[in-house]
Amino acid sequence: MSAQRIAVASFIGTAIEFYDFYIYGTAAALVFGTLFFPDLDPLTGTLAAFATFGVGFVARPVGAVAFGHFGDRVGRKATLVVSLLTMGVGTVAIGLLPTYSTIGIAAPVLLVLCRFLQGFGLGGEWGGAVLMATEHAPAGRRGLYSSFPQVGPAVGFVIASGAFLALSAALTDAQFAAWGWRVPFLASAVLVVVGLYIRLRIAETPVFEKAMLEQEREKAPVAEVVRRQPRSLLLATGGMVITHTIFYTVTTFSLSYGTTELGLSRTTLLVAAMVAAAVMGVATPLLAVLSDRVGRRRVCLWACILAVLWAFPLFWLLGTGDGILVAVGFSVAMIAFAGVFAPMGAFLPELFATRYRYTGASIGYNASSIVGGGITPLLATSLVATTGASWPVSLLIAGLAAVSGLCVWGLHETRTTDLTDAGAFTR
């Protein structure tokens, strides 16, 4: 099977899974506060909705360990099929949930359980998808091929936002709150069927098959990666934090902040976020190719510097309320995001040995999402509620970007690493 076909299959799978994950964030910002926490004031309800949003990020490293274990012992392909099914079940179930007005406190409890299932499934998705791409990639082009699954989140977000935008335009607020928000969740069932059809037709990676023939299979991959490469795991996790921070600040927190605090229209913010996601989708393969030429580490460091410099202008432009300026602010932030995210598709797998590569890459990616994606929107909302200003959020973003930059600085350059060499780095 050609590497190009594998790369496309990886892209489609991540696009579907991230679509599922992102529609929750949009719904949490727009309607979940009133539907599942109606007894709370609007701000507190939004905080509660973001708290359930954060549950998905707590579940992601749990899923990374579980799916990583089987991905390193059974294979990349089978594990990716199960992760897609897990995500699909959790997403469709959310679309079928009764709200607080129907079943009371059981509604938010079930919402949390479904969100956990979503995060658990996504925890096994990214690592397996980038491994399918990188372990099939020709020498010297792993950055490019790993960028295909990296573009999936941008496409998933555009589709998710487009769905909510179309529903907002076609329905009244009452109709949207009554049933319209359910449509994107239920539509996931169709996308999952398409994704499963594609996933079942791809082949196992040659790197993994070679490792199995040579009996390089760990009984407990998570224990091995922690024992053999704790430094790489810790620094990789820290290096990824800024990607989740930027993405969910732009696509989730800013949507809530812009509508509730600044009085901006939902449409303006959704369109601006979609433009930014499209820019990110275009920038990702370009920056990934650049990382094949100048190194993963260098591109990531440049992006972290840009994130520090753009943390304040991002909210200054959002505060203008001008749709074009908001889109510019979001887009530059997402270029900074892509500057770290694009190289990491190859960088993380290259850091770890074959026999526990799925586990190491998945944990590094998903553990970082707890801070960047789960805690940041909640903390940012609290900071705005306390201070009434956006500068503390900008300071938070700049600080996390600096931390990520320092972590990347501490990693080895890996673009010439031989993925068939089980040794990798042992620091």
Image (spheres, grey):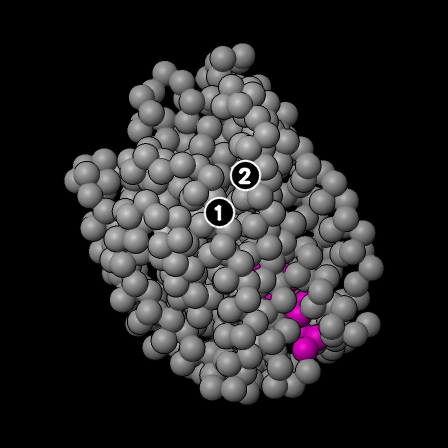
In the image: residue 125, left or right of residue 314: right
Looking at the rendered image, the quarter that the N terminus falls into is bottom right
Mark 1 surroundings within 10 Å by alpha-carbon count, few (fewer than 14), some (14 through 19), many (20 or more): some
Confirm or deny contact between disc 1 and disc 2 (CB under 8 A): yes
Mark 2 surroundings within 10 Å by alpha-carbon count, few (fewer than 14), some (14 through 19), many (20 or more): some
Q: Nearer the viewer, residue 185 or 355?
A: 185
| Residue found 40% across the figure and 41% down from its top | 255
Residue 349 image point, x, y percent:
56, 71
In the image: residue 396, left or right of residue 348: left
Mark 1 / mark 2, whichever is N-terminal: 2
Residue hosting label 2: 165
Q: As shown in the figure, which amino acid type bears the numbered disc 2?
A: Leu
Query: Which structural element holds mark 1?
Result: helix
The part of the chain drawn in magenta is: 126-137
Q: Is residue 405 above or below residue 194?
A: below
Asked if the magenta segment contains residue 135, the reply would be yes
Looking at the rendered image, the quarter that the C terminus falls into is bottom left
In the image: residue 7, left or right of residue 304: right
